[in-house]
Image (cartoon, helix red, strand yellow):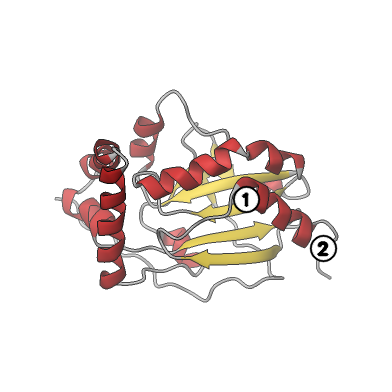
Amino acid sequence: MATQASVPPVVERPAVGTQAPLFSLPSVRGPMVGLAAYRQRRNVVVWFSRGFTCPFCRVYTDNIRTGYEALLASDTEVIQIAPNLLESARRYFGPDPLPFPFVCDPDKRLYAVYGLGDRGALEATRTAVVSFSYAVSQGEGSTWVKGAYLDVLNRNFLRRLHHHAMTAIEQGLFVVDKQGVIRHVSVVGPIDPVPKADRLAELVREHCATQSSPA
């Protein structure tokens, strides 16, 4: 059995007005996605999501997918980051990947760099029960199980099962301007609502439109 990799401790969350920590990760669509590539070109909403398996995850992702044009109109890209395995995400989305970059951070190292942590066993239990109950009530139980199954199948059964049933990773939204500076931060629980695309576009216009690069 594979050894569970150690996850670095969560550091202090990057503050508004500071440079966003850079990263480069392979995407579901294939190419590497690096935050630095958008410098001087586009604003970026860096979205640390809970993943793609639970019905809440899919609703929030679909809300951004359906309103994606509003973000493009505000000269903004979304990069969705998930703590799933890349190969699982590629199999799950298949021939219909998202229109915006989707990358994976299965060891949650980038989550830690951005100051996002686990809310503990009690919150994890509540999250798992609520997610599965909602999926069953909506007739999506098999979809929920399929997503989790792909992740568990692809690496270390116990480690990935723990990820789905015993963790409650925070979700974070970091609005980064064209100079790479964080202009807005929102952190919510693992199944709490995430703003829709039109609201994200409003946040970009509010916080990035008149900003200049720091001295």
The three-letter code of the residue at mark 2 reads Ser
Q: Which mark is residue 213?
A: 2
Residue sitting at 39 percent across and 44 percent down? Answer: 52
Judge the density around disc 2: few (<14), some (14-19), many (≥20) Cα neighbours within 10 Å: few
Is 124 above or below relative to 29? below
Q: Is residue 132 visible?
A: yes
Quarter occupied by residue 71:
top right
Q: Examine the rendered structure and indicate whether residue 71 appears above or below residue 187.
A: above
Q: Secondary structure at mark 1?
A: helix
Q: Residue furthest front?
A: 137
Image quadrant in which the C terminus is located: bottom right
- The residue closer to the viewer here, 94 or 123, is 123
Whichever of labels 2 and 1 marks the residue nearer the N terminus, that label is 1
Question: Can you name the residue that lies furthest to the top here?
Answer: 95
For the point 58% across and 36% down, the residue is 66
Which mark, residue 35?
A: 1
Position of 46 with respect to 112 (left or right) is right
Give x and y (percent) for residue 193: 49, 57
Instruction: Kindly state the secondary structure of the residue where label 2 is placed.
Output: loop
Image position, residue 161 (x, y; %): 21, 52
Residue 26 visible in the current orientation? no
**Image coords of residue 185 (percent x, y):** 61, 66
Asked if marks 2 and 1 touch (Cβ < 8 Å), the reply is no
Amino acid carrying label 1: it is Leu
Q: Quadrant of residue 8?
A: bottom left
Which residue is drawn at the image coordinates 31% and 49% (left, top)?
A: 134
Residue in the image at 34% along x and 47% along y: 54
